[in-house]
Image (spheres, rainbow, N blue to C red):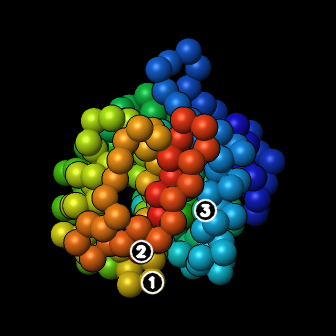
Amino acid sequence: MRVIAGTSRGRQLTTFKGRDVRPTPDRIREAVFSILQSKLGNFIDLKVLDLFAGSGALAIEALSRGAVSACLVEKTSSSAEIIRDNLARCQLDDRAKLIVSDAFQVLQCFDAESFDLIFLDPPYGLGMAERSLVDIDKLKLLNKNGILCVETGKEETLPDSVGQLQRIDQRCYGSIMINFYS
């Protein structure tokens, strides 16, 4: 897995070896960021939240492309070590904050309209994506012109709207479904 564009372009990222984890493949991340760029214009000065961050690849890609800051939330200490390593190897750790905690508890700590771009990539099929959408809407964490990007398995169905959040796009890549809300 590598960083696709920006200041860290081409840098290899550490991933999970031999685990039951599913990092978003490079080609899908490239497609997602192309869609996001068409909707956002660019990533300059964006504030990013990456819930269920895994290896941190999504937030790192956004930082590499010009996001001013990223908050990465991951529950496991082994994943947190991989994120720290990836941020350091890309020289992006000065613009990132890593929180090792449960995503649902952390959401309560943020102020309204804290983020321009939110990534959700929770474990598939456990209802965590929809629960996250409900909490993010209730807490109004996404800026008015922001985008929320949710990765699920293609068999997991998310609603067209959750409170004020409206699905604006949806793409299927093999067994992965990407939903965009604003």
Circle nearer the viewer, 3 or 2: 2
> What residue appears at the point 38 percent right and 84 percent down from the top-left corner?
144
Real-space Cα separation, disc 1 to disc 3, in angstroms: 17 Å
Circle nearer the viewer, 1 or 2: 2
Residue 39 percent coordinates (x, y)? 59, 76
What secondary structure is found at the residue carrying circle 3?
helix
Give left or right: position of 45 versus 49: right
Q: Is residue 99 visible?
A: no
- Marks 1 and 2 close (CB-CB < 8 Å): yes
Seen from the viewer's position, the closer of residues 93 and 142 is: 142
N-terminal of the two: label 1 or label 2? 1
Give left or right: position of 55 versus 142: right
Q: Local crowd at mark 2 within 10 Å, few (<14), some, or many (≥20)? A: some
N-terminal of the two: label 3 or label 2? 3
Real-space Cα separation, disc 1 to disc 2, in angstroms: 7 Å
Disc number at residue 145? 1
- Marks 1 and 3 close (CB-CB < 8 Å): no
Residue 181 percent coordinates (x, y)? 42, 68
Q: Is residue 125 visible?
A: yes
Q: Which residue is mark 2?
A: 182
Disc number at residue 62? 3
Seen from the viewer's position, the closer of residues 62 and 160 is: 160
